[in-house]
Image (cartoon, grey):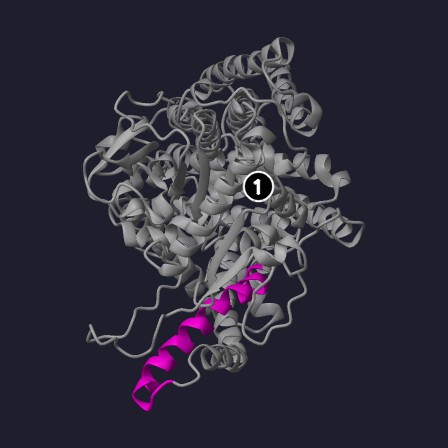
Amino acid sequence: MADASPTEPTTSGQVVELRVHGVSRAGADQVLNRPHLQQVAGDRNGGFYRPRAGYPGATGPGGVTLEAYRWSDLPSGTAVRTLSLVFLLPFMLCNVALWMRPGNPGSKHVVLALCRVLALTLTMLYVLSIVGVALDLVAWRCMGTPSCMAGRSWLSWLGGRSPGLRLGVLSVVPVAAIGIVWWLGSRQGHPFDAFRTPVEQTSAHRLSGVGQWDAAPLVGRLRSVHVAASFATLDGSLLAARASQHSSPVMVALVVACGAVLLTCLALLTSVRVIDRLGRERRVDGFIRALRTVTCGLTILVIVHVMRSPAPWPQGGSLPGYGAIMAWLFVSQTVLVAILAAVVLWCRGGRQRKGTPRSGPLRALGAPVFVTIAAGFAVAFSAELVYRVSDLLDRDGDTADSLETSPPLAYKWAIFGFFLAVMSALLLAGVITVLTRRRRRRAAAAIVAADFPVAPPEAAQRLRQVEQAVARARFTERLEPLTLVYACLAALGLATSVLGLVQLYPGDVLQRFIGVPADLVDFLIGLGSYTIAAIIVGLVLGGIFAYRTAPFRRYVGVLWDLGTFWPRAAHPFAPPCYAERAVPELTKRITYLVDQGNGVLLAGHSHGSVLLAATVLQLPPRITDRVALLTYGSPLQRLYSRLFPAYVDEEALHEIGQRVGWRWVNLWRDTDPIGGWIFASHRPGDTETSTGPPASVDRRLKDPQGVVPPPSDSVPPPILAHLPCESQEEFASAVRDLAERLRAGRRRTG
């Protein structure tokens, strides 16, 4: 991070209000609501800004010095980075699942090992999908069929060649695909040492570790293991095809070597203490890099052996062994998910840590749920890729079942299961919406009646709009059981892929046992394929609009920022973690401001409050004694405590409050679907259970401010929901309150 600019205004002895925006903010001028700013630290991806000297409005409420930290370009600053989040979505979800483990310390290593092995199966699935396109559909089937090559000069150049030569030459495609994710996983968002603050460990809580330790060694080890397993997966596919008609000492040696590589990769991923060592470990890192190098050499030997082997090849059909490998991979994923769910359920029912968050359907169940969703998306994306290429190679436009280029049965079952899971989830969402509408509207009506008890008759329509906004915001809690049901359906669909091992077609099975016509099942499989394509297109468009349109980022940015907040500890090809820069950078800046004699009022909106929570846990006591905290629209309790019980719990929230001397104010609205209260809701008529300093943290904001147009306007005040509240008087009042507390503390210590 750059040091303070020479033109930075001197603020010694003042209170600096450092604002950290959420996912919906694009520029520092919007955060501070000031047109003329100057950057005083950081760079164009993440920097600190202040109003320019000499312009009006340089100070905020209570005379505080305004400063903003802009981090919006760290997780999605460029179109390439944003779109990579779309295509790496399964990897990102699997990586997030690792951080959703239960709070029970005894489950840590088991959950870590299972999540990492499941992450490895996603990488293997990625390689197998490319193998299915390049080797199975193109090299083996299409190039072996004259009618498929007719008129296709880009394929006919290998026509008439031996299957081994075709497979060897087309192996360059999966090798290139492995190289792409290898390159993407090797890219660092920033030089870590430039932003790391050399401070001692100040908190024993797990959340304090985010951004404090250098994750590069761990990511490097995981990346080498995944690259080695990727090449071993390609080798296994080629050797399985060759072994169907040929066996020799060389073949046996190559198969044994390939199996040894895969077993070593699994052993490394399950050795949590070995692979999680902090810093550089010469022996461990050297062994893992050697494993990767040996596997790359093994791949060359396998390709050469396949190309030069003189033994005859089988004719027709699919690539030998490929369908069985796919089906067994799906079976392995299903078994691993079941084991992970059993471990989590056992830990969830056992003794929990002190300060466990309020119970909910997803409390501590996020790990198996999100892993299942990640696997479902990965299988769906892979199946769609194979199906689209199959359709491209199909000249006659017949159904895929009658084609020589028909995908493996495991893919058919996967698409059918994914489609049923999506449709069932949508149907269930509609049912939940209808069944809970009356209860949500009744609760919303009570809130609105308490906020606007004497509304005039002409405000009836506006009151209904406010009630609808409150009711919609309360639907967030209903997403938990919906997500859980979808994950169960996706796991069931993944499990049905095992039927492909015994060559059972979905249409035949359902017609025989349920009575559903086979033609209808084939139609649903085709519809499911197009549904997956529509989802992929929607994700791409969402990534583009999230980059180009700041308001749209408010809706899709929550997923991206939540997924990339956590370090890459499960999947090395997930998008980089921006908190590894943002948290140390904030820590260093706050330390600098306090050392200059200033008090620092940290103001975080939405996800910015999560960054500040992790930052406060890293600050030493001499710094936190001069720090106050203002959060608004914060998802700490409503989302993070439910999804990440081992990292954001009541114990962590209380420690944050104690560190800042309970100079903490949290503003929230009933119309907000993301943010909420931290300790106590303070709704009208509610009986508060929180006592002591935590009871004074939360302050509820009435939203909207009124339901009739004020005398100076022709429309009523807007419903702000999750939008920031810096322009509201309640925000200014909280700033003045906290600033005065900081000044009073300085006078006492002075």
Q: Quadrant location of residue 59? A: top left
Q: Quadrant of the C terminus?
A: top right
Is 188 left, or right, of 101 in this rendering? left
Residue type, mark 1 in image = Val
Q: Is residue 415 visible?
A: yes
Secondary structure mostly taken by the magenta-highlighted segment of the chain: helix
Residue 168, percent from left and from top: 42, 22
Of residue 497 and residue 126, the one placed in the foreground of this image is: 126
Q: Is residue 404 visible?
A: no
Of residue 162 and residue 515, the one placed in the foreground of this image is: 515
Of residue 208 and residue 12, the one placed in the foreground of this image is: 12
Q: Is residue 473 magenta?
A: yes
In the figure, 146 relative to 675: above or below? above
Residue 113, percent from left and from top: 67, 34
Is 552 left, or right, of 423 in this rendering? left
Of residue 379 and residue 390, the one placed in the foreground of this image is: 379
Q: Residue at x 45, y 72 (%)?
A: 470
In the figure, 12 relative to 288: above or below? below
Is 36 left, or right, of 161 in this rendering? left
Question: What residue occupies the far bottom of the structure in this picture?
Answer: 457
Give the secondary structure at mark 1. loop
Label 1, on which residue? 660
Which residues make up the magenta segment? 455-483
In the figure, 110 relative to 411: above or below? above
Residue 266, percent from left and from top: 66, 28
